[in-house]
Image (cartoon, rainbow, N blue to C red):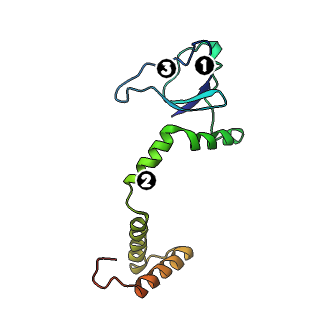
Amino acid sequence: MTKIYSFVEVGGKTLIAPPAKPPRFESVVYLTQLDGRHYVATREELPAQPPEIELQGPIDLAAAENRPLAELLDQRAEPLRWVRAERARAYPPIGDQLDAVMKELQRRRESGERLAPEMEAMLDKVMEVKQRFPKDGLGSG
């Protein structure tokens, strides 16, 4: 389980990372700096730390008192921002994703499965639009 810690750098002292192990070869992931504190994530146990760095953690981001911090880290943590951007570029266009979902819902409805009322209504709207604006042999869908 990933643990979040924060610390300050003081007089050249900083966090001592646990030894890196294969296959990841990085034991600590730097997240961001907020109000003079550095935030890192690790799955490893941290070795003893210099008291000067004022280590805090592991920080329970699910705890109510830490929700503001969790939201800030979610917005500012560089690895999270990078992953979101890479996923956004790699995913198929949202229209294609929704079309696949609607086709699956239509298949389920046609096979007799009962859908949630909200999904029935959405599927009806989508099918009505597809009938109003057919592709007429321009492709599937």
* Numbered circle sitting on residue 88: 2
Question: Is label 1 in a helix, a strand or a loop?
Answer: loop
Name the foreground residue: 20 vs 80: 80
Q: Which residue is mark 1?
A: 9
Give the CA separation, mark 3 to mark 2. 31 Å
Q: Position of residue 110 (x, y in %)?
A: 39, 80
Instruction: Say whether residue 10 is left or right of residue 109.
Output: right
Instruction: Say whether residue 41 is left or right of residue 135.
Output: right
Kindly identify the amino acid type of the residue bearing the numbered disc 2. Answer: Ala
* Numbered circle sitting on residue 17: 3
Kindly identify the amino acid type of the residue bearing the numbered disc 1. Answer: Glu
**Mark found first going from the N terminus, 3 or 2:** 3
Residue at (53, 20) in percent of width and height? 46
Residue at (60, 19) in percent of width and height? 9
Residue at (44, 76) in percent of width and height? 113
Asked whether disc 3 touches disc 2, contact meaning CB atoms under 8 Å apart, the reply is: no
Q: Position of residue 80 (x, y in %)?
A: 50, 42
**Mark found first going from the N terminus, 3 or 1:** 1
Name the foreground residue: 131 vs 18: 131
Q: Position of residue 61 (x, y in %)?
A: 62, 38
Q: Position of residue 112 (x, y in %)?
A: 42, 79
Instruction: Say whether residue 73 is left or right of residue 88.
Output: right
